[in-house]
Image (spheres, grey):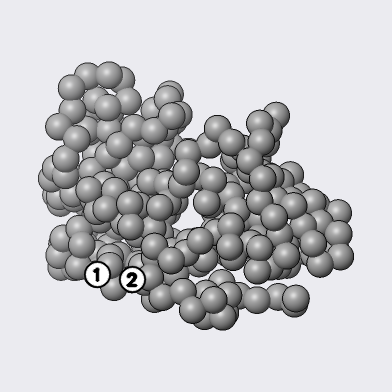
Amino acid sequence: MSYASPETLLDTLSVEEPEEIDLEAIAFHCGAVVRYRTLDGCAARIVGSGNRAVITVDEFASPGRKRFSIGHELGHWMRDRGKSGHLCQKSDLKARWDRSDSESLANAYAADLLMPVSMFKPRAHNQQPSFDTVRGLAKTFKTSRPATAIRLVQYSSFPVVLVAYGRDGRRKWFKPSPQLEGMIWPRTELSHETQAFELLYGGTAFNRPLQTRASEWLDHRSAYRHDVWEDSIKTDDEVLCMIWWKRQQDLDALLS
Ligand SMILES: [Zn+2]
């Protein structure tokens, strides 16, 4: 079997709804068997020979993470067949999705397979990019919250930035919606005046969307005169924050 895009695979297997996306069946169709094992120091791996491969996934990972790992390894299998194999770290699965290195391409493949644009975009349409929306979509697509949040940023109807801060309150990575690429830089240090700060350091936080000063989030020179919406959640090792504008004109005023 030669390279097949996620869209082609889903089409071939007549998959039309999110609940029909059976990763093990898709892998089998591609000549790969999936096993769940205790993996030391990596999240997933693929070992292939000829047209056959074995994908091994960390049995202790969450269900959403397991699915993403299978999609990621299939992405490697499609592009790098004939090479000896891949060992993928947890951090590989968080690599950006829009670069051309093999880990990013494998992540993009997994995202297109687990959350196909044709199914995801209509379900994200006009939904506020809050973590309530992320939870709903993650349930529908059986994906992890971080992966679903990144996908939502790509296809949201609203201008939005997803930003992750580590336990030390320093920015780890951020992902703007396509229209904001190269225009918005979240602060490198998490502001004390945010819900995210309270979540990170154990205080009480409302944990629902709140309107805050844009200057708590952005270094833009006129940010103190404008507001943004914030919603945040805490994960294992970071706090994830969605920052968005409900009206295009609010963003335009900030950027003008
Ligand atoms: Zn990988």
Number of labels in the image equals 2
Task: Say which residue appears at 18% left-offset and 49% top-offset.
Answer: 229
Residue 68 point in image, percent of width and height: 53, 52
**Which residue is nearer to you in this view: 247 or 133?**
133
- Quadrant in the rendering for residue 100: bottom right
**Res 31 visible:** yes
Q: Is residue 103 left or right of residue 197?
A: right
- Quadrant in the rendering for residue 184: bottom left
**Res 71 visible:** no
Task: Say which residue appears at 27% left-offset and 27% top-offset.
Answer: 199
Task: Say which residue appears at 20% left-offset and 62% top-offset.
Answer: 127
Q: For the N terminus, give its image quadrant.
A: bottom right
- Type of the residue with mark 2: Lys
Residue of label 2: 121
- Type of the residue with mark 1: His
Distance CA(mark 1)–CA(mark 2): 6 Å
Q: Do callouts 1 and 2 mark residues in contact (Cβ within 8 Å)?
A: yes
